[in-house]
Amino acid sequence: MGPVLFVMAILGCGEGDSACEQVRLANARYPTEAACLAATVPELERADDILYPSVVAQCRPANQTARPLPASEVRLPDPDARSPFPPVRVARGAGRVGRSL
């Protein structure tokens, strides 16, 4: 078996408890999950054309089938945290980060 490559799925999330749906796959393939995660913020900044209240990125092995991301797995970052960057939505568990409109 060859090396595992990772892809970044961009998911749009609606209001309430509806699951986030895959909207597109990023063009790049990544050699590690860490490399994929490191590329999420720039990729989400390019996803400004996606018309969902929240957009998240999910890094997964390229050979793994996409699955809907339950809204319960997406949470906002700590509102008290001071950051020079715009708000970013983060999903619980490894491999998922996102932004909110």
Image: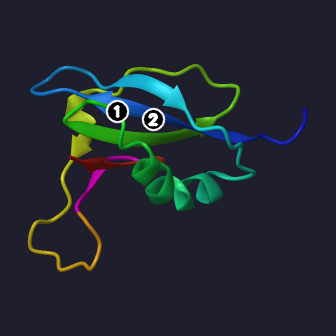
Residue 88, x across and y down, in percent: 28, 57
Which residue occupies 34% across, 48% down?
A: 98
Type of amino acid under label 2: Ile
Asked if marks 1 and 2 touch (Cβ < 8 Å), the reply is yes
**Which dot, 1 or 2, sits closer to the camera?**
1
Look at the image and name its color scheme: rainbow
Q: Which residue is mark 2?
A: 10
Residue 8, x across and y down, in percent: 56, 40
Q: In the image, which residues are magenta?
A: 87-94
Q: Residue farthest to the right?
A: 1
Residue 16, x across and y down, in percent: 9, 26
Visible residue check, residue 43:
yes
Residue 28 to residue 9: above or below: below
- Say how many tags the image has: 2
Quote the CA–CA distance across marks 1 and 2: 9 Å
Q: Which residue is mark 1?
A: 50
Q: Residues within 10 Å of mark 1 (few under 14, many from 20)?
A: some
**The disc label shown at residue 16, or none:** none
User: For the N terminus, which image quadrant?
Assistant: top right
Secondary structure at numbered mark 1: loop
Q: Residue farthest to the front?
A: 49
Residue 55 to residue 82: above or below: above
Q: Residues within 10 Å of mark 2 (few under 14, many from 20)?
A: many
